Structure formats: structure tokens, C-alpha cells
Amino acid sequence: MGSHPQDVTVEPPQFLRLAAHPLRWQLLTALAEGDHRVRELVERVGEPQNLVSYHLRLLRDGGLVAARRSSFDGRDSYYRLDLDRCAEALAASGAALHPALRQDTALPHRPVAGARSHRVAVLFVCTGNSSRSPIAEALLRHHTAGRVTTASAGTSPKPDLHPYAVRVLRESYGISLSGGRTRTRHVEALAGRRFDHVITLCDKAREDCPRFGTRQVHWSMADPGATDGTGQAGYAAFQEAAADIDTRIRYLIPVLNIPETLARSEP
């Protein structure tokens, strides 16, 4: 008689176990749009705070979600989705089912399609408009080859762009701001302009930013210039911030490519 392989019970990959829960999927979906505080997620999903906090902890333990203290109100924390980790985990889950389902997890740097009747406009806002928002503006313009109208501004702008912001764009991404805008801009100077997406990168700016009547999301990011560091230690904070912004920009670009996103913003 031939031997028969024993039945083996294999648990689903951790990503599937975490994401398959209806409430956790709601939380992941909300965080995929932008960073949120617990009370905002509670309102979004309509569940008690203790239950939401419990499932957020499971997502954090699984490495899919991270949290950082708000720079505006230290009693609050902003939760964010680690999209790179989710992409890797999703690809690994497919490969666990069958090797042929392994996918390339690298997000393509594809420009936003240009043949549209309405050109997408994106505004980045932080407090000083000297570091985070101009870096985001430059990176989005760079990755979309200028096919997206990009701008940045501050709710309380400093006089000039931080020299480390100019340097990191040049050295890490080959983007030169020489001959371009090196002065900051107040958000009020953009009143009356139309933007399809407004993205705040500073917790305080999120509270102070005027409403443009458009899709507004938040990326909670520390100010790399807040430490007043000099030399390589200070510059390293800008390298880290720029890399974080670049990752978020790469995941923003496919959203800008979705026709339904544009349709919702049309008058």
C-alpha cells in the first residue's frame, strides 16, 4: 500500500489573520487615507474607544500600524498605516498560498496620466513651510514630471526654506531648487485657488489650516528642523523626513490616478 501524506493544518499568514477581522479592516481602510487620532477612528467606525484601542494595539504589534505623539497636543497620538509593510505582507501572503502568486512589491514610479480635462492640484501645508511641505511639493512634482499642479504653504511661515531641505532634495533626489521658489509662502496667499487634495504634514497646521472645501488628509510628521541640530546629526533628521515623505508620495500617486477621485472633486 502506498503511503498517504498526513493532513497538515497551517495557520493563515499573520497579515490575513489581522486584516480579516471586520473592525481591523475598517481601521486599516481609514488609516490608508491618512493619519488619525483614536477619537477620530472611534467616530469613524462607531465602536467604543476601548475596543478600538485594543484592535489598534494588535495592528501595532503586527507591525502594520505605528503611532507618534502629536506635536500640537502631547496628550494625543496619531496613528498611521505602514503601507510598505502592508505591501510586503500582502505579497508574502499570496506566496504562502502558491509560489506563482508572489508579486513584485515595488511600487512603480509612474507619472499621473496627463490626458485629463481637469489637472489635479495638490497643496501641502505645514507650520513654517520651510522643511516638510516644500520637500513634499518638490517630490510630487518630480515624481509626476510636473503633470500635477503642486504647491506648499505655511500657517505661520518662516522667511526662507531650511538649507538642509534644499540640500537633501539635491543630494538624495537630484532636485535642484536653484532658480525656483526658495522663499516661504503663507497659506492665506492661496485663498481662492482650487486644490483637489490638501495634505497637512504638521499637527499644529492641521488645526490651523483653513478649509479649502476639498479632500483634506493629514500626515503626522515631526519637524526635522525642530531640534536645531547642526552638522551630520541635524542633516540626518532631514534625510529621514524626506525618505518618509517620499514613501508617502509614492503611495499618493496611484490615488491621484484614480478617475473616481477626480470625479468626486469636479464641480
Image (cartoon, rainbow, N blue to C red):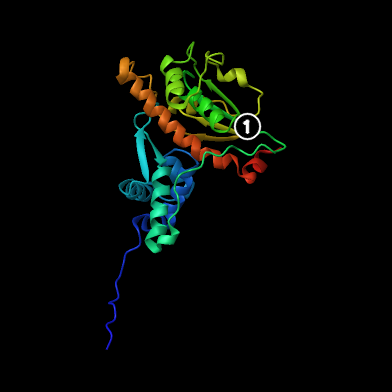
Q: As displayed, is residue 259 above or below residue 17?
A: above
Could you tell me which quadrant the C terminus lies in? top right
Tag 1 residue:
147
Residue 101 in picture, x, y percent from top left = 44, 59
Residue 235 in picture, x, y percent from top left = 35, 20
Q: Is residue 228 left or right of residue 266?
A: left
Could you tell me which quadrant the N terminus lies in? bottom left
Q: Residues within 10 Å of mark 1 (few under 14, many from 20)?
A: some
**In the image, what residue type sits under mark 1?**
Arg
Residue 139 in picture, x, y percent from top left = 51, 28
Relative depth, front residue between 48 and 109: 109
**Quadrant in the rendering for residue 131:** top left
Kindly identify the residue that appears in the image at 45 percent across and 50 percent down.
104
**How many numbered dots are placed on residues in this image?**
1
Seen from this angle, which residue lies furthest top?
A: 159
The answer to whether any part of residue 46 appears in the image is no
The answer to whether any part of residue 25 appears in the image is yes
Relative depth, front residue between 59 and 248: 248
Residue 17 in picture, x, y percent from top left = 36, 58
Kindly identify the residue that appears in the image at 36 percent across and 19 percent down.
226
